[in-house]
Image (tube, rainbow, N blue to C red):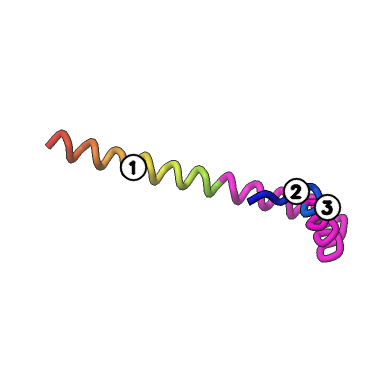
Amino acid sequence: MNIGVAGIVLLVILGLLLFGPSKLPQLGRAIGTTLSEFKRGAKGLVESEEKTENNKDVL
């Protein structure tokens, strides 16, 4: 799935129209924080699953 330059420009213009220029930086920060927390949580789930599998192999 490739958005391209035209799609990115369209999304930026749409964002400016919906949220205004003052809210976009706050929105970007919130999205970045959310993605970071999601990645951290997913990594924690994978690590706990691997530990569970390793403990089953030992028994």
**Which numbered dot is residue 58?**
none
Q: CA distance from mark 2 to mark 3?
A: 9 Å
Q: Is 52 left or right of 29, judged from the image as shown?
A: left
Magenta region: which residues? 8-36
Which of pointers 1 and 2 indicates the residue nearer the eye? Answer: 2
Residue at image coords 59%, 48%: 35
What residue is rendered at 78% in x and 57% in y?
11
Total number of numbered discs in the rendering? 3
Distance from the alpha carbon under mark 1 to that under mark 2: 38 Å
Quadrant showing the C terminus = top left
Q: Pointer 3: residues within 10 angstroms few (<14), some, or many (20+)?
A: few
24 drawn magenta = yes
Q: Residue at x 74, y 55 (%)?
A: 27
Residue hosting label 2: 4
**C-alpha distance separating marks 1 and 3:** 41 Å
Question: Given the image, on which type of amino acid does mark 3 rest?
Answer: Val
**On residue 48, which mark appears?**
1
Image coordinates for residue 47, horizontal then vertical, percent = 37, 39
Q: Nearer the viewer, residue 56 or 10?
A: 10
Labelled pair 2, 3 in contact (Cβ < 8 Å): no
Check if residue 21 falls in the magenta segment: yes
Query: Is residue 28 shown left or right of residue 22?
Result: left
Lower position in the chain sequence, tag 1 or tag 3: 3
Q: Quadrant of residue 22?
A: bottom right
Task: Say which amino acid is labelled 1.
Answer: Ser
Relative horizontal placement of residue 7, taking residue 55 as reference (left or right): right
| Residue located beneath label 3 in the image | 9
Please tell me whether mark 3 sits on a helix, a strand or a loop: helix
Vertical comparison of 25 with 13: above or below: above
Label 2: how many residues lie within 10 Å, few (<14), some (14-19) or many (20+)? few
